[in-house]
Amino acid sequence: MISGGVWVARLAVAVVFGWAAFAKWADRPGTRRAVEDFGVPPRWADAVAWGLPAVELAVAVAVLPSWTAVWAGVLALLLLAGFSIVIAVLLTRGRRPACSCFGAASADPIGRMSLIRNAAIATLTGLAVWGSLAHNDIPQSLSADRAVGLAAIVGFAALLGYQQLQLRRMRRQMQESSAVRTPAHGLPIGAPAPAFEANDTDGSGRHTLDKALAAGRPVLLLFLHPGCAPCAEIAAELPQWRQRLDNTVTTLIIGTDDPSSNAEWAREHRVGPMLVPDTMEIVTRYRLRGTPSAVLIDARGRIASSARVGTYAIQDLVDGLRPPR
């Protein structure tokens, strides 16, 4: 019975780390973006984006044979400990980058649940290491049919987990569609960007588009609404976007609610000052029909991108603004 439990623990560790490695290699751009968002310098991002899943795959393979299971488990524990420390440091600094640890379907901002998940995986890995030390002849001590049966059960559980992640991704997309309701038409690329002026939530005065363009950089307009769940996901990404686009693009956050609600929401999500126009005419002039929305204006004051609606579309727009290395 103990041998069976240890074998299941090893299989589960192999599934977790193998799944993580495959997901990272399947989404190379997303993995590189996540690596940078977690603080890796751009010059090392490619190497880490390749090396990390390679190490995870090595753990997944090596944790199965008895003669390498202990060392693989120890390496897995070191990876989990290092990752948890990085998450804790980022959270204390108010940063919540998205963790695509198990593919795009799991790309949620880090938080307390990330640490709990890592602790659960570490506990499972610790059991596999302890069991392997105490029973170093696994899976030889199990009959072939029992070992295969347990492997099938673990594989089926992994499949159910994958399906749950896909369902969550579908629900998220449906939530975005519900928030957006109708697709944004936007202004044609090359058209003059409508001028506007608005107060900010910090009460520092009036801001205008011309003032933002005076820096000689493109301007990214982000339209967010306090009651919009996808807008909260955008807010979690903002610190990383600003760091990545520093001195390249000026980002302005346009609120679409009353000043007090925007100010409270901005403080809660730590997005900095939001601009609050006197009326929603700015949304009409830019032909936007939902939140979160974004549009890029070039340094000459002309529309430089189609209107983007939803977290994925806005993320693609921001990724295209990555400064040259």
Image: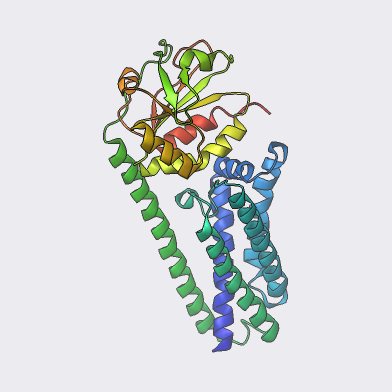
Front one among 278 and 216: 278
Instruction: Give percent across and percent down for residue 290.
Output: 32, 32
Does residue 80 sit above or below 89 in this rendering? below
Quadrant location of the N terminus in the rendered image = bottom right
Say whether residue 225 is visible.
no
Quarter of the rendering containing residue 193: top left
Does residue 316 sit above or below 99 in this rendering? above
Front one among 107 and 62: 107
Instruction: Give percent across and percent down for residue 118.
Output: 57, 63
Front one among 309 and 223: 223
Quarter of the rendering containing residue 176: top left
Residue reaching furthest bottom?
Answer: 1
Instruction: Give percent across and percent down for residue 115.
Output: 56, 61
Residue drawn at 70 percent across, 74 percent down: 70
Residue drawn at 72 percent across, 37 percent down: 43
Count of numbered badges drawn on the protein: 0
Does residue 140 sit above or below 210 in this rendering? below
Say whether residue 119 is visible.
yes
Residue drawn at 69 percent across, 68 percent down: 72
**Colour treatment of the image:** rainbow
Does residue 194 sit above or below 141 in this rendering? above
Quadrant location of the C terminus in the rendered image = top right
Instruction: Give percent across and percent down for residue 131.
Output: 64, 82
